Amino acid sequence: MTHSRLRDEMNGIVEAPGKVWFWELEAGVIDADRCIQCGTCVAVCPSNSIGINFDTDLPELVRMCTGCSLCWDFCPRGGLRYEALWPPSTVTADTESAAVAPVEVRSDSSDTYFKITGGPPAEGLGAVIEQFAVRSAARNEEAQDGGAVTSLLSALLVAGEIDGALVSVPSSDPDEPWKGVATIATTPAEVAASSGSFYNQTMALAELDLSAYALPAKPRIAVVGTPCEIQGIRAMQARRWPTGAHRVDAVVLTIALLCTKSFDYEALILRELEERRRIDLDRVSKVDVIRGRMIVEYRDGEIAVDEPVKDFHGAALKGCDECADFLGRSADISVGSVGSMDGWTTVLVRTERGRLAFQQARGKLDVRGLDDPAALIRLDNLDKRIALRSLERKFDPDAPLFIDYEEHVRNYEDTDRRPVTIRR
Ligand SMILES: Cc1cc2nc3c(=O)[nH]c(=O)nc-3n(C[C@H](O)[C@H](O)[C@H](O)COP(=O)(O)OP(=O)(O)OC[C@H]3O[C@@H](n4cnc5c(N)ncnc54)[C@H](O)[C@@H]3O)c2cc1C
Ligand code: SF4
Ligand code: SF4
């Protein structure tokens, strides 16, 4: 069933006034090259009318659209004002107090601390109950940083606190090396196989149609995702709507990966790395974007690529420029590399739910204070400035980028002065 045939069939239908149809999302976000492939529109559609076009990895209409408007309302690049989901920040420039200050976490739309559309800027790290640098006590060579996410999910599965976790694993298609695809891991071994970062979006929330998995009738699922994916979850959980096949109600924990940008798979891995730089993808052990540089490492320790990330800007998702949520403020826990030494994961515990989850794994982790919490704030400010500029460019396409990419890299270097170390 192709979306164009469906669209043709629907052309005779009189569109009721005041409704927003899928093709308005298609025109305003997908065809405008602004989609960040979060899968929220697929998950929210009550008539299961939206699927994934596996040639483009973008949403497409697979059944009749009823014009309910929800795909537009919940799309982070459409009608969703995701800043409204951010709990109140207790932190200002004094990042030390963030570690101890208790915080009331709410998610109603009155808690608007930052709007890229105007209003006062959100200061600090957002709602944070506890902040740590964390490393798996049993070293995890496959992990991206300290292996905190893998340890946490494994501990929660073993303790029976969750039945599964929405994670990313390597595609099984041999034509798609180094492509992450979304799946639900239900055992510690499956979680371990999901360690590490993929720099492509996976339409993750579409995987919340859990019918393909053997799970209890009332499953409890943790979601690991980029901040825009967590925004989609939080929005759907905060507002009632008639649900379709996707089990947003099953999500009991959200873990956001700190994120300034993601990439188009084909453009980054196949065009920039394999074709242009002749990288042997079979030999790659790790792809990392860190300190403003793209670093690709072979299994024997050779650094195959170490270049400014600006050289790969053409492969980045254009919709990421509009994103002001580097810190994943609406998650229960945010994790990243910035703020900690190499081999450690920065962990920001934001909610009571997140704190209880972290407690489950604590015995399996080395835990200490963050090395440089201010680095998180500097990168967050930079991210927001780019988002603001991106918004201004919508009204004046000729306006220069607020940050040129040389400055961007200098800022990264100021932000994160750790030397590059080879981990294996
Ligand atoms: C696109 C992207 C951009 C990022 N940008 C930054 C950044 O700018 N600064 C920063 O400090 N950190 C960034 N990170 C986070 C960082 O790379 C690590 O994921 C984080 O530090 C956790 O490390 P860990 O060793 O604890 O995780 P691990 O134990 O290795 O587990 C990683 C988990 O993330 C999941 N995962 C991997 N790729 C994806 C994906 N594409 N979508 C959803 N889930 C995924 C895996 O399935 C696994 O569950 C980014 C991650 C991604 C995917
Ligand atoms: S950004 Fe997300 S919600 Fe919006 S069209 Fe793309 S996949 Fe759908
Ligand atoms: S930069 Fe923002 S929009 Fe892009 S993948 Fe990361 S969280 Fe999503």
Image (spheres, rainbow, N blue to C red):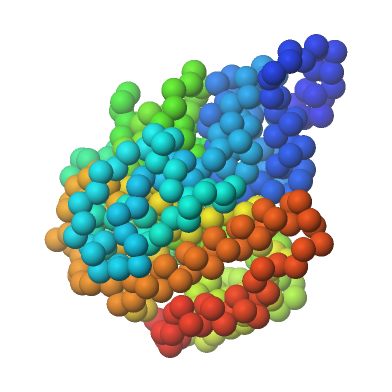
Work out whether residue 88 or residue 280 is closer to the camera in this orientation and state it. Answer: 88
175 relative to 400 in the view: left or right: left
Q: Where is 36 relative to 278, above or below?
A: above
Give the x, y percent position of residue 255: 37, 51
Q: Where is 32 relative to 258, above or below?
A: above
Work out whether residue 420 or residue 1 is closer to the camera in this orientation and state it. Answer: 420
The quarter of the image holding the N terminus is: top right
Residue at image point 72% right, 42% down: 30
Residue at image point 80% right, 57% down: 397
The quarter of the image holding the C terminus is: bottom left
Give the x, y percent position of residue 298: 53, 79
Q: In this orientation, does residue 233 appear?
A: no
Work out whether residue 106 or residue 422 is closer to the camera in this orientation and state it. Answer: 106
Q: In this orientation, does residue 292 appear?
A: yes
Residue at image point 63% right, 39% down: 78
Which quadrant would residue 388 be assigned to in this image?
bottom right
Number of numbered discs on residues: 0
Q: Residue furthest front?
A: 120
Q: Where is 27 relative to 14, above or below?
A: below
Residue at image point 59% right, 26% down: 70
52 relative to 94 in the view: left or right: right
Give the x, y percent position of residue 325: 49, 55
Work out whether residue 372 or residue 278 is closer to the camera in this orientation and state it. Answer: 372
Q: Residue furthest left?
A: 363
Which quadrant would residue 347 be assigned to in this image?
bottom left
